[in-house]
Amino acid sequence: MIDHIELWVSDLGRSRAFCDAALAPLGIRILTEAGPESGRGSHLGYGRTEPAFWIGTSQPAGGPVHVAFAAPDRATVADFHAAALAAGGRDNGRPGPRPEYHPGYYGAFVLDPDGNNIEAVFHGDRP
């Protein structure tokens, strides 16, 4: 349904270091970079095969946004959480079940350098 999303960040270098580390356990990496010569600031496109998650500087960083990335299993959720914290993220929900969403929901939440809530989620067996 959604093709891509972009977050405006206040410091592209700091956000790049965070995203590179936090998203690596999920198999997500930078696939494309666009510099300021585009007239729209600098942008980095992350994904597995196509850029679907972008960070950029063409607008002031806005209010917090929540973005969730699918993980293939619970261990990857934990790896994401540990990598994000090591990269300077702030814990916003340790890895664990979230039965209030559905019985198989297992997620972890970290605030990025701009306060965005970045999540990794494994859905397990959905009812």
Image (cartoon, helix red, strand yellow):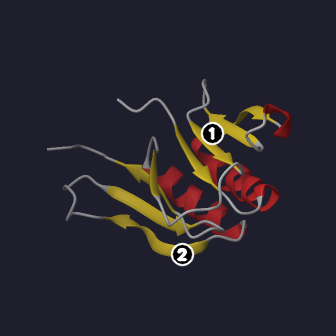
* Location of residue 99 in the rendering, given as x and y in whole percent from the top left corner: 21, 63
Describe residue 90's horizontal placement relative to residue 2 as left or right. right
Which residue position is annotated with label 1? Answer: 28
Q: Quadrant of residue 54?
A: top right
Disc marking residue 91:
2
Disc marking residue 118:
none
For residue 61, above or below residue 24: below
Q: Residue furthest top?
A: 49
* Location of residue 38 in the rendering, given as x and y in whole percent from the top left corner: 79, 32
Tell which of 29 and 37 is nearer to you.
37
Residue drawn at x 62%, y 54% is 8
Q: Amino acid at mark 1?
A: Ile
Q: Amino acid at mark 2?
A: Asp
* Location of residue 53 in the rendering, given as x and y in whole percent from the top left corner: 57, 40
Describe residue 115's horizontal placement relative to residue 124 as left or right. right
Confirm or deny contact between disc 2 and disc 1 (CB under 8 A): no
SS state under label 2: strand
Q: Residue furthest front?
A: 39
Between disc 2 and disc 1, whose residue precedes?
Answer: 1
Describe residue 26's horizontal placement relative to residue 58 as left or right. left
* Location of residue 83 in the rendering, given as x and y in whole percent from the top left corner: 66, 61
For residue 18, above or below residue 6: below
At label 1, counting other C-alpha atoms closer than 10 Å, the crowd grade (few under 14, some 14-19, many 20 or more) is many
Residue drawn at x 61%, y 24% is 49
Tell which of 119 and 10 is nearer to you.
10
SS state under label 1: loop
Q: Quadrant of residue 6?
A: top right
Tell which of 76 and 62 is nearer to you.
62
